[in-house]
């Protein structure tokens, strides 16, 4: 019975303080026996929870006391972490215990002091300023409280009943009809705002004890904020975890209520947390001192609560650091587990909530803030925080009523795992709690959050509040801080299995997803005559090497001991000598070296751009030339390059036309070569000319070009010969060829025939012609690649153009592919706008020439397949004629030798390229991951997004080399196998249910989304080119964009004013929660924004609020909104401003600015929109629920 | 037409002898090709460890040429090898060398499978230059080459033994 001893109320300093000492103590004592009837919702649980956090369970949750009594013992026995816990917690416990007994004021003070001490010792996370934010938080909190009181007085009646009936009643209504249930509940309270609910309920329920309640709630809030912010910066996660436990304890009651009240709107919570919280939580420390007296003085529930809330984070934050530094990796993980476990065990699991907030809302947001050009410090958040509060009361009550009734029905069930699973359904947004409840079955108490089993068929709301964060590797804090950003470098398994056998057992693919040339806002660039590398494996020195002594370092990939060169001893940053470990190379996992002349044999090539334009009748008809020429004219000065930059143009129809732009000519000279069977260059030079010297001629040409071919009758297209000419033109220098093609090439080498049978478009059986029809383009691409020339293809066609064959030209020469189906300048303005935007990005983005990328990994791991656009030159070396910031790569790996003798593995990508300024540069990313030996740990570290992206890549390969149906089967099997393997490991799970670890809970959803994606869907009419393009995208898009393509984000935007907000660059950006991709979420009264990565759809419901239509769309009513609307007017209204700031915030986060399309209910384009609602059933495909059942069936088989 | 048993045996003996003798030569040829292939793979795989050299863009072209050249060489070898082997099998069938045929049939089927499973654009099995350097393809091809070399060598000695045995016994 380890539990009672280890139950420190203390970490929750304020919370504990808030309670009358007596009851608290008695509860505590009682907890182990699980005796106390749960008559008081909040406090009871709170106290119960304390124990639960450390091994026992909250009795308040159910009559089944016997169940809980087992807990401690089991907990003690079950895991290795126990030992850590034991060693870890005691110090804290002792302090807290005292706190609990002492009067509240005293405790809090004491607590702060203590916390201060800790805090001062290690101040890793003192971020931000203390004062401003805190005040903000206070004010917001107070607001909250008052509002809660006011509005809820009426409400009391109802509430009291529900409370008395039993806690459980609200928490775990046992409905047999679970699946439908959630929907209802979701509808009931999607908009309950977190703070209000918590505060109000609390106050209502325990008038006498309400002090802590609100405060705690707030505390959670702040806490989670803090935690959210931490991971973002890749700071220590340990702190987070630890905090969470602590706050967990304190926050318990609140959380409880929250869990009940709060439904769909976790988002708001998070947002709020983020916005206000970020500031308030982190700085806290200084504030914490002052707060206590407020508390002591305050007689009302509200004010003390507020203060406590503000203060709490400080202790937790401060208290936590001491352990963390000491932790080595393993203890750390144990710690984390312990933390998580506490959350699981705890009844209402504030931790979970926090953690989820962390995962769901907070993290991404913070990240997004930083990613925006100027990371904006969050501004005093009073205003933002206050927003949500006014909202949601009405919905709350029904929710309560709804929830309450079922409860009494079967209280006895509550202790059981299945029973608990139901809980979340009632409160979909809080579904994360479910497993915590499920976690009552003890053995989960040891599991980390990511392992928490989730019942997929019953948990309907598995989507996080905002975007899905990347899991943070379970490393110690120092390494974690140094580790590479998940945006550039992600591994499908953040815990690498020790052996291939273990990997095989897990049935998950092992691979890396790279975005190596991503635009970075901050990148240490190192100029040094010697670049320090391992002498045997040539690894670049990185943060994860170990310095044996001052003069030697040990390579982390091959373990060879190398000398530190003399130069490296001097640190240019600090201007000190003898600190090699402080050099920027060793402090940053992403660095860029400027290479010395050793790295080049020929002088770096200049930037050379060649444009190959289709000018046949078809092309002129579509009218793309004007757009291209216009964009080029506008961006001519912004083309990356230096004084040597060269540019050239080729046009082609049935002949190939060259343009002599030699400086000194009065006007551009067109040279026509009609011998397309044996193409030659009409003049040896002056076809590629210096951009600066011939600027006027180029401008003339661009102005003239759109009109030069207006009357052409030439319908043929000799793409092949034109490409051959381009190759000849480019081969001396290398560079970039941009090809614009509008139809099937019909003349000369590389001519193609239509292979698509329109009747087969919606075939469910065989999809043919996914591979190229000829190897002409591939061979040419290889030639180009050899000459350092990349070919980028813009296909703007209205009919079938055999992209499968044409794409080869870009695929193997490391180019990129853009496809604009049914492009027409005036008939299809959305596509025209898209082309314009894409071109702007394309022409002005960074570019790297003659690049090679090498991926190295720790001895024992080996890379076996690459995905992306490139030529594989050696088993670990990719040859990239061009590299662009929008290119992503994927790599599959296997474990060749057991990794038992190492606890960490590292991956390093080195991208050597010539910048547009003619510098040879090396960009190095290093990722470090822990090695684990147990299957559960492998699951705990699974990165579902990375897995899905890697699977998508593999499926594309499979569908080309084998067949589409094979690929689809393989995708389904991937889910079935991995879930079956997981369920086999977790033997305690009921086999009749479909369970997934929390880390993989989105896996089936994403795979279903993949199956319904254009690339892999069957049964729905899909044009072959569209399908092939989607496949090309999957191979070459970086993870972030790919995920949007696979699973778009849906937001409700007609009530943005009420959403919580963040501040980015002086703009207020609302943060609506993510909605499920299901028609059930669409209401006629609403307006929804779907973010598909390259396109935004705004869907307007028929009964949408006229104010919204007027303010945001600029039309008086629904009927007058035009069919083709691609822009939002700038209306001087708050909702308009919010909507636009939200959209531009979404746009800023990606390189290609997406096109906006407004869709009304009867718009023909609405099918485009509805096809993305992947959770719904279509004629040809399962709904999400059916898909799950199907999986379950296959697992049982 | 039914042959007299003795004649038939004689014929079959001669045929076997002949076939086996031929087999030996062809086997040597095939083994030779295999050796060539293995050398080619080694060449493919062995990249110069000097990174500076590798990263040099000029080297890129040589390297690519090299890969292409080897791939084309390999592609050229594939068809003759397959056809010779199937010719063998037909001859063994005629000579009613059931055991030998039985030993060769699995490989024959494998060859058929490989030949017809090749995707139209000729990706991994057909030594496609862009794909061949993916480690799994390369390793697969290499393993295949070694296995076949072993098989051909063994069968060479087996045929030799059989031929001498038939010569001696007849």
Image (cartoon, grey):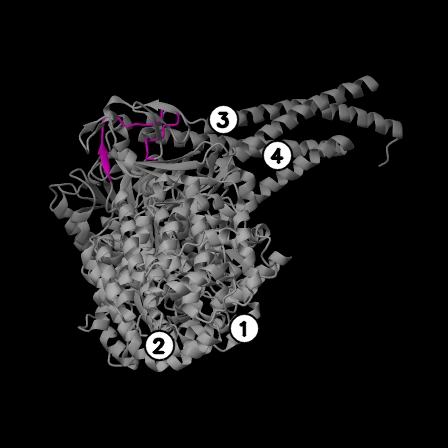
The Cα–Cα distance between marks 1 and 2, rounded to whole angstroms, is 32 Å
**Same-subunit check for callouts 1 and 3:** no
Q: Secondary structure at mark 2?
A: loop
- Residue annotated with mark 2: A1101
- Badge 3 marks a residue whose secondary structure is helix
- Crowd tier of the residue under label 2, counting other residues whose Cα lies within 10 Å: few below 14, some 14–19, many 20 or above: many
Label 3 to label 2, Cα distance in Å? 64 Å
Q: CA distance from mark 1 to mark 4?
A: 66 Å
As displayed, is residue A258 above or below residue A101?
below
Q: Is residue A72 magenta?
A: no
Q: CA distance from mark 4 to mark 2?
A: 65 Å
Q: Are marks 4 and 3 on the same chain?
A: yes
Do the residues at pointers 1 and 4 share their chain?
Answer: no
Name which of mark 1 and mark 2 comes first in the sequence: 1
Given residues A21 and A1006, the one toward you in this image is A21
Q: CA distance from mark 4 to mark 3?
A: 22 Å
Q: Is residue A536 magenta?
A: yes
SS state under label 4: helix
The residue wearing badge 3 is: B42
Residue A526 lies, in percent from the top left, at 23, 34
Residue pointed to by mark 4: B82
Magenta segment, principal secondary structure? loop
Q: Which residues are magenta?
A: A524-543
Count all numbered tags in the image, as a single digit: 4
At 43% from the left and 36% from the top, the residue drawn is A905
Name the spot of residue A259 as percent of width and height, x first.
41, 67
- 1 vs 3, front mark: 1
Q: CA distance from mark 1 to mark 3?
A: 65 Å
Judge depth for marks 4 and 2 and give the one in front: 2
């Amino acid at each position: 019975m380890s539990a009672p001893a280890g139950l420190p109320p203390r970490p929750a300093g304020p919370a504990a303080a808030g309670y009358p000492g007596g009851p608290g103590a008695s509860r505590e004592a009682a907890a182990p026996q699980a005796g106390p009837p749960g008559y008081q919702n909040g406090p009871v649980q709170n106290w119960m929870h304390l124990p639960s956090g450390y091994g026992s369970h909250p009795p308040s949750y159910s009559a089944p006391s016997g169940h809980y009594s087992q807990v401690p013992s089991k907990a003690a026995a079950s895991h290795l972490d126990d030992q850590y816990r034991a060693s870890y917690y005691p110090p804290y416990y002792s302090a807290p215990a005292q706190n609990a007994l002492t009067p509240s004021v005293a405790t809090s003070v004491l607590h702060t002091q203590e916390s201060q001490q800790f805090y001062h010792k290690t101040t890793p996370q003192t971020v931000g300023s203390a004062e401003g934010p805190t005040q903000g938080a206070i004010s917001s909190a107070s607001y909250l409280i008052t509002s809660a009181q006011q509005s809820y007085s009426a409400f009391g009646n109802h509430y009291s009943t529900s409370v008395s009936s039993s806690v459980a009643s609200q928490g775990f209504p046992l409905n047999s009809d679970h699946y439908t249930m959630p929907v209802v509940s979701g509808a009931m309270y999607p908009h309950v705002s977190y703070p209000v609910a918590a505060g109000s309920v609390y106050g209502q329920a325990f008038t006498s004890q309400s002090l802590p309640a609100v405060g705690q709630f707030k505390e959670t809030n702040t806490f989670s904020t803090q935690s959210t912010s931490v991971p973002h910066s890749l700071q220590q996660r340990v702190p987070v975890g630890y905090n969470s436990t602590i706050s967990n304890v304190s926050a318990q009651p609140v959380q409880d209520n929250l869990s009940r009240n709060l439904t769909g709107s976790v988002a708001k919570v998070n947002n709020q947390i983020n916005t206000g919280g970020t500031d308030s939580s982190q700085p806290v420390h200084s504030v914490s001192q002052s707060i206590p007296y407020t508390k002591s003085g305050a007689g009302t529930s509200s004010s003390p609560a507020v203060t406590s809330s503000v203060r709490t984070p400080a202790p937790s934050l401060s208290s936590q650091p001491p352990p963390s530094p000491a932790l080595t990796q393993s203890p750390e993980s144990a710690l984390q587990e312990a933390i998580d476990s506490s959350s699981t065990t705890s009844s209402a699991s504030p931790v979970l909530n926090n953690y989820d907030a962390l995962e769901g809302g907070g993290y991404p947001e913070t990240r997004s803030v930083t990613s925006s050009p100027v990371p904006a410090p969050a501004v005093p958040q009073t205003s933002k925080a206050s927003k949500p509060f006014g909202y949601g009361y009405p919905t709350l009550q029904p929710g309560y009523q709804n929830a309450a009734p079922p409860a009494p029905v079967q209280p006895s069930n509550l202790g059981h795992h299945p029973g608990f699973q139901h809980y979340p359904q009632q409160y979909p947004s809080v579904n994360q709690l479910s497993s915590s409840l499920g976690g009552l079955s003890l053995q989960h108490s040891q599991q980390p959050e990511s392992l928490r089993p989730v019942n997929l068929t019953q948990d309907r709301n598995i989507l996080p509040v905002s975007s899905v964060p990347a899991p943070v590797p379970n490393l110690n804090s120092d390494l974690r801080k140094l580790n590479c950003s998940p945006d550039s470098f992600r591994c499908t398994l953040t815990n690498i299995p020790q052996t291939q056998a273990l990997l095989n057992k897990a049935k998950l693919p092992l691979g890396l997803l790279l975005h190596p040339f991503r635009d970075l806002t901050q990148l240490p660039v190192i100029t040094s005559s010697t670049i320090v590398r391992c002498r045997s494996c040539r690894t670049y020195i990185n943060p994860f090497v170990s310095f044996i002594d001052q003069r030697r370092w040990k390579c982390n990939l091959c373990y060879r001991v190398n000398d530190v060169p003399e130069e490296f001893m001097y640190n240019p940053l600090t201007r000190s000598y003898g600190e090699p470990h402080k050099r920027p190379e060793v402090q940053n996992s992403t660095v860029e070296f400027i290479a010395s002349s050793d790295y080049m044999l020929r002088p770096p090539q200049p930037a050379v751009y060649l444009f190959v334009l289709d000018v046949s009748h078809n092309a002129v008809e579509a009218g793309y030339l004007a757009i291209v020429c216009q964009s080029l004219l506008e961006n001519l000065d912004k083309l990356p390059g230096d004084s040597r930059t060269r540019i050239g143009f080729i046009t082609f129809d049935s002949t190939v036309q060259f343009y002599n732009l030699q400086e000194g000519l009065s006007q551009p000279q067109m040279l026509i070569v009609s011998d397309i069977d044996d193409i030659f260059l009409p003049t040896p030079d002056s076809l590629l000319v210096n951009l600066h010297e011939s600027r006027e001629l180029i401008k003339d040409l661009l102005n003239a070009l759109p009109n030069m071919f207006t009357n052409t009758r030439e319908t043929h297209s000799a793409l092949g010969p034109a490409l051959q000419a381009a190759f000849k033109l480019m081969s001396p220098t290398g560079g970039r060829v941009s090809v614009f093609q509008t139809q099937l090439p019909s003349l000369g080498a590389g001519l193609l025939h239509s292979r698509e049978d329109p009747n087969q478009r919606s075939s469910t059986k065989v999809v043919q012609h996914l591979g190229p029809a000829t190897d002409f383009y591939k061979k040419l691409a290889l030639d180009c690649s050899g000459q350092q020339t990349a070919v980028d293809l813009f296909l703007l066609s209205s009919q079938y153009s055999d992209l499968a064959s044409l794409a080869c030209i870009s695929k193997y020469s490391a180019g990129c592919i853009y496809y604009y189906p049914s492009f027409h300048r005036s008939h299809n303005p959305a596509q025209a706008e898209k082309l314009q935007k894409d071109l702007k990005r394309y022409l002005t983005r960074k570019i790297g020439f003659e690049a090679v990328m090498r991926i190295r990994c720790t001895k024992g791991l080996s890379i076996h397949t690459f995905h992306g656009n490139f030529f594989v030159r050696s088993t670990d070396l990719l040859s990239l004629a061009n590299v662009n910031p929008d290119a992503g790569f994927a790599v599959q790996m296997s474990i060749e030798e057991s990794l038992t003798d190492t606890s960490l593995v590292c991956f390093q990508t080195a991208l050597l390229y010539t910048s547009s300024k003619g510098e040879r540069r090396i960009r190095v990313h290093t990722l470090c991951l822990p090695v684990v030996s147990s299957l559960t740990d492998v699951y705990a570290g699974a990165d579902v997004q990375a897995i899905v992206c890697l699977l998508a890549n593999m499926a594309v390969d499979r569908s080309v080399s084998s067949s589409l149906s094979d690929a689809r089967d393989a995708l389904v099997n991937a889910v079935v196998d991995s879930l079956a393997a997981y369920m086999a490991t977790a033997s305690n799970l009921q086999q009749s249910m479909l369970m997934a670890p929390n880390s993989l809970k989105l896996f089936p959803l994403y795979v279903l989304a993949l199956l319904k994606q254009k690339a892999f869907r069957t049964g729905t009419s899909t044009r072959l080119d569209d399908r092939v393009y989607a496949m090309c995208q999957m191979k070459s898009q970086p993870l972030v964009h790919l995920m949007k393509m696979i699973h778009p984000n849906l937001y409700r935007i007609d009530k943005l004013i009420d959403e919580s907000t963040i501040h980015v660059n002086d703009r207020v950006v609302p943060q609506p929660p993510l909605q499920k991709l299901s028609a059930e979420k669409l209401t006629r009264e609403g307006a929804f924004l779907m973010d598909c990565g390259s396109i935004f759809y705004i869907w307007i419901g028929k009964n949408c609020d006229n104010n919204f239509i007027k303010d945001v769309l600029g039309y008086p009513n629904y009927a007058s909104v035009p069919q083709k609307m691609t822009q939002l007017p700038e209306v001087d209204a708050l909702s308009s401003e919010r909507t636009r700031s939200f959209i531009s915030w979404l746009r800023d986060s990606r390189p290609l600015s997406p096109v906006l399309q407004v869709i009304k209910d009867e718009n023909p384009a609405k099918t485009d929109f509805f096809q993305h609602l992947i959770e719904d059933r279509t004629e040809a495909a399962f709904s999400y629920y059916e898909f799950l059942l199907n999986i379950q069936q296959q697992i049982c088989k | 037409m039914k042959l007299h048993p003795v004649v038939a045996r004689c014929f079959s003996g001669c045929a076997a002898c002949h076939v086996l003798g031929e087999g030996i030569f062809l086997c040597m040829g095939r083994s030779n090709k295999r050796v060539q292939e293995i050398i080619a793979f080694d060449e493919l795989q062995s990249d110069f460890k000097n990174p500076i050299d590798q990263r040099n863009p000029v080297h890129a072209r040589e390297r690519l040429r090299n890969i292409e050249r080897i791939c084309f060489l390999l592609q050229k070898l594939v068809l003759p090898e397959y056809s010779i082997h199937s010719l063998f099998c037909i001859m063994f069938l005629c000579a009613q060398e059931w055991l030998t045929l039985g030993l060769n049939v699995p490989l024959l089927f494998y060859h058929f499978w490989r030949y017809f499973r090749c995707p139209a654009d000729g990706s991994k099995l057909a030594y496609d230059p862009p794909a061949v350097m993916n480690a799994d393809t390369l390793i697969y091809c290499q393993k295949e080459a070694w296995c076949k070399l072993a098989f051909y060598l063994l069968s060479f000695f087996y045929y030799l033994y059989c031929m001498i045995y038939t010569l001696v016994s007849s």
